[in-house]
Image (spheres, coloured by chain):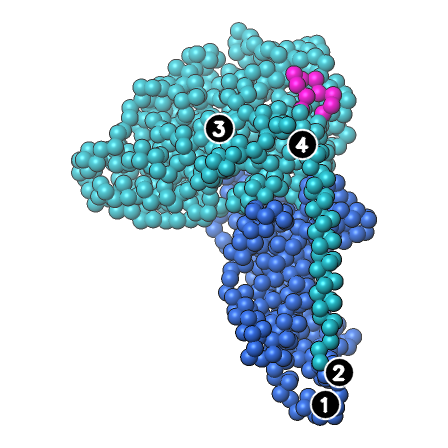
Chain colours: A blue, B cyan
């Protein structure tokens, strides 16, 4: 197990190195540069040239890459060209928002999706089954941003039940520790701050949960149906075990393996779905920030954020692999 | 047999949800009473920096305008110069030394006194900037207005317009300039020339920019400690929640203290999301209202303010970018006659928009009612093209996507109307849509192989040079011409000390420009800013200099 983890982490080094080269070349080959975004329609040729010169953008790309790598070795990701804050600071301020949003969506998707998929399978061909299959089809098809707009129009604009934007009511004087607003509220015992942050998560969380929820329902349903037809289930039932035992020990446990894999893969998808949800709900996370940074050609932010996300993505998948052995002892990691 | 547990679980979740809902709901209800002196205003982007000397983006300057004051300031709701921290100002006989009489009894937010000495500390700070402070993205407006520094570290920097500052007594200060310039004193209204507390500047090392040229790091003053004399004080900037909070300056010495206790700027970059946040009550006002939303929001009872148009949208004709035919004045005249600008203004621009006859709005001194005009005349356009031997003209027409600007609400619609007009006179159009930043700005700014494009400008301060001089006072790749006679006339206007004489020269310049016709001015659009149904007191400003100090809730 330990060697497995170390090996997977070592594999990360050449992968990140390759990624950094590809990214660097791709980004710097895009037409236009940050000077255009900085100056807007005010840019005179002299000002453009001076900024390019300052940022060292006219040097050979190899020299620029060398400078970037030198900084990377010192674990320094540089400073954002547009906000002038350190890339690491920017990440630490925005990433918790995205994580909160993704976790909310994932909790909604799992908490609703697995029971629903299971029940649909158990009642195959009955009303609940038809409704959940049709519902999940719609869930996959509806674009996240459209759902987000609809949810907001109904529950924020018209019914005034939920806030329409942001992560927390700005009139609340909340203490920031980790930048996970709900967690911070709990840690500092500012209950209203925590409740308000949670309240801000509901609509974007629902919007973002739509696709993973639909997928989890379908995968769970298919997987349970498959397991229900297996010989060992029939054997267990024939032995006279109660339905609850059969359901827990035999059906659910065996059916969860493909569901766990799917959830692992969905986690990556949540990050990209967050780009749209965050924009619609003016939610301060990394998704909207990365989209802005691309149009601003903010090279340090893009390089830094994508490298960090790559590392995190590998780590999440490593955790998913490890979770297999917990769900199903037959799958041993070597 | 099914166990009853799922039902219990569902009931528990429902109760918990209701409990949280009730809690959050009561929070919102409770704060209702205190909300009457707290205004949350939706802005399109985060400010970049809180020291306006280092800023050029609208959102940073919006914050600065509430926290800081300048020696002179634009009249409320207009562009004319009125007293700020200075009560009066006069030039000497040569026009190069200006004496400012300062208001007395003014204190900075940190309790220190404002006086002539403080003014000189500020000007000397800018003038003596060294190292990264001379970077054009760090001190953009200083370089735009003053040119260079005491000791220029870059070869391309010109001699500084500013020369010295002398504090004659506590309330009298002399600013000396190296030559007469049209920019003085109007440019001193810019928030970039805000007066900071000398003590805070030193304490938080405002001029020590860290890092390297490609890795600029602002000092803590610029990110956490802006200290001015304005009606609001900086309280906090919660980057993670995209909100910036200001609070009332209780010691404010100006005419009127702020009516609001707290003013919060909340960043909501998506225009639709700002509208929804206003309707849902998250915010009580926002800027950059989409032109299509102006009427609906007004009808819903929101307090819609229309700024006087202080911008221009133009069609640029690049004379050396690609098609050499554009260097022929008859072709440019034909294009001007081909455009039905009135129809465009009527159908695609917000109410109150006007057709432009020249490259500056009529609220700026120097606007000339008698410039050559080019009326919509298809026959004349065709005839001029035939005379120029350009009947089979094909032009590459660049237009931007994914952007709205105050002068240009919907670029794609504008492009379609303009190109239909041009096609009607026989010009073939090759459309080239590009993403606004960086592709479009890059292509038009560097002049690479484009014939036509549209772009615009919102004025910084009320002087004609800030409009026409920005476009035409020297060769620029955007236009691709080299008209020395025009450039000389600009130089003469810029160095004319007498304001009245200078305005006459601007009038002459406007005539010359419209004769030479490097591009076609299209329109001036009034941008809108909206407030909640119960918010009053703010006056819309053509310079986006809205003063939140006068904002209040109707009781």
Q: Is residue B360 visible?
A: yes
Q: CA distance from mark 4 to mark 3?
A: 25 Å
Q: Are marks 1 and 4 on the same chain?
A: no
Q: Are marks 4 and 2 in contact (CB under 8 Å)?
A: no
Q: Earlier in the sequence, mark 4 or mark 3?
A: 4
Asked whether residue B58 appears in the rendered view, the answer is no
Residue contact at pointers 4 and 3, CB within 8 angstroms: no
Q: Position of residue B385 (x, y in %)?
A: 21, 38
Residue A305 position, x and y percent, is: 64, 55
Badge 1: chain ID: A
Cβ–Cβ under 8 Å for marks 2 and 1 = yes
Q: What quarter of the picture does the N terminus of chain A occupy? A: bottom right
Instruction: Please report, as a chain letter, where disc 2 is located.
Output: A
Residue that mark 4 sits on? B36
Left or right of residue A141, residue A330 in this image: right
Quadrant for the C terminus of chain A, please.
bottom right
Give the extent of the magenta segment. Answer: B249-258
């Amino acid at each position: 197990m330990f060697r497995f983890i170390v090996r997977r982490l070592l594999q990360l080094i050449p992968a990140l190195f390759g990624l950094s080269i590809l990214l660097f070349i791709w980004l710097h080959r895009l037409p236009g540069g940050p000077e255009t975004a900085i100056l807007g329609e005010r840019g005179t040729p002299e000002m453009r040239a001076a900024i390019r010169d300052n940022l060292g953008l006219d040097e050979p790309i190899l020299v620029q890459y060398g400078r970037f790598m030198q900084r990377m070795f010192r674990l320094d990701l540089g400073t954002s060209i547009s906000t002038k804050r350190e890339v690491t600071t920017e990440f630490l301020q925005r990433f918790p928002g995205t994580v909160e949003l993704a976790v909310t969506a994932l909790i909604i998707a799992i908490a609703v999706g697995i029971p629903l998929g299971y029940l649909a399978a158990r009642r195959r061909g009955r009303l609940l089954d038809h409704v959940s299959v049709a519902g999940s089809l719609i869930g996959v098809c509806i674009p996240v941003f459209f759902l987000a707009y609809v949810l907001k129009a109904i529950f924020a604009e018209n019914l005034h039940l939920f806030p329409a934007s942001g992560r927390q009511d700005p009139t609340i004087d909340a203490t920031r520790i980790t930048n996970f607003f709900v967690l911070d509220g709990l840690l500092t015992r500012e209950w209203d701050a925590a409740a308000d942050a949670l309240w801000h998560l509901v609509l974007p969380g629902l919007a973002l949960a739509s696709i993973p929820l639909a997928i989890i329902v379908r995968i769970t349903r298919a997987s349970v149906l498959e397991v229900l037809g297996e010989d060992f289930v029939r054997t267990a039932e024939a032995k006279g075990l109660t339905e609850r035992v059969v359901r827990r020990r035999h059906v659910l446990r065996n059916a969860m393996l493909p569901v766990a894999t799917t959830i692992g893969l969905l986690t990556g998808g949540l990050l990209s779905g967050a780009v749209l949800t965050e924009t619609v709900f003016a939610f301060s996370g990394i998704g909207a920030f990365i989209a802005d940074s691309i149009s601003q050609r903010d090279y340090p932010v893009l390089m830094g954020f994508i490298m960090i996300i790559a590392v995190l993505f590998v780590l999440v998948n490593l955790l998913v692999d490890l979770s297999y052995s917990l769900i199903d002892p037959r799958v041993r990691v070597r | 047999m099914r166990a009853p547990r799922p039902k219990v679980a569902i009931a528990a979740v429902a109760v918990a949800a209701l409990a949280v809902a009730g809690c959050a709901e009561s929070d919102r209800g409770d704060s209702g009473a205190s909300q009457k002196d707290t205004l949350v205003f939706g802005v399109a982007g985060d400010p970049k920096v809180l020291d306006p000397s280092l800023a050029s983006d609208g959102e940073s300057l919006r914050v600065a305008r509430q926290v800081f004051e300048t020696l002179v300031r634009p009249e409320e709701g207009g562009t004319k110069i009125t007293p700020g921290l200075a009560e009066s100002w006069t030039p000497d006989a040569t026009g190069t030394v200006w004496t400012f009489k300062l208001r007395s009894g003014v204190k900075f937010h940190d309790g220190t006194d404002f006086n002539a000495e403080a003014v000189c500390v500020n000007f000397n700070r800018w003038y003596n900037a060294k190292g990264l402070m001379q970077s054009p993205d760090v001190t953009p407006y200083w370089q735009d207005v003053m040119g260079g520094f005491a000791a220029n570290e870059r070869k391309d920097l010109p001699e500084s317009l500013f020369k010295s500052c002398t504090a004659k007594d506590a309330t009298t200060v002399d600013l000396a300039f190296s030559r007469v310039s049209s920019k003085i004193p109007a440019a001193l209204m810019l928030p970039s020339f805000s007066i900071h507390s000398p003590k805070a500047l030193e304490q938080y090392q405002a001029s020590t920019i860290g890092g390297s040229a490609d890795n600029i790091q602002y000092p803590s003053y610029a990110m956490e400690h802006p200290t001015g004399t304005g009606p609001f004080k900086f309280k906090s900037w919660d980057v993670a929640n995209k909100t910036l909070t200001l609070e009332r300056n209780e010691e404010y010495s100006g005419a009127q203290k702020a009516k609001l206790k707290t003013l919060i700027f909340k960043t909501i970059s998506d225009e639709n999301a700002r509208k929804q946040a206003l309707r849902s009550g998250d915010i009580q006002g926002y800027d950059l209202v989409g032109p299509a939303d102006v009427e609906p929001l007004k009808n819903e009872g929101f307090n819609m303010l229309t700024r006087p148009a202080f911008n221009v949208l133009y069609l640029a004709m690049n004379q050396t970018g690609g098609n050499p035919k554009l260097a022929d004045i008859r072709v440019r005249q034909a294009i001007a006659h081909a455009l039905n600008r009135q129809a465009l203004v009527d159908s695609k621009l917000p109410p109150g928009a006007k057709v432009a006859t020249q490259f500056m709005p009529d609220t700026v001194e120097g606007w000339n009612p008698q410039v050559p005009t080019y009326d919509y005349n298809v026959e004349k356009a065709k005839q001029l093209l035939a005379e120029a031997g350009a009947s089979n003209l094909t032009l590459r027409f660049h237009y931007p996507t994914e952007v709205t600007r105050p002068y240009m609400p919907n670029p794609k619609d504008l492009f379609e109307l303009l190109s239909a007009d041009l096609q009607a006179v026989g010009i073939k159009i090759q459309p080239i849509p590009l993403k606004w930043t960086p592709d479009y700005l890059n292509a038009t700014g560097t002049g690479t192989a484009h014939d036509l494009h549209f772009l615009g400008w919102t004025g910084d301060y009320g002087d004609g040079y800030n409009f026409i001089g920005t476009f035409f006072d020297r060769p620029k790749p955007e236009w691709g011409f080299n008209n020395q006679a025009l450039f000389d006339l600009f130089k003469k206007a810029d160095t004319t000390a007498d304001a009245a004489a200078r305005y006459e020269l601007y009038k002459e310049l406007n005539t010359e420009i419209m004769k030479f016709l490097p591009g076609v001015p299209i329109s001036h659009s009034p941008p809108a800013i909206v407030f909640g149904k119960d918010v009053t007191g703010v006056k819309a400003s053509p310079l986006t200099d809205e003063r939140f100090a006068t904002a209040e809730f109707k009781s």
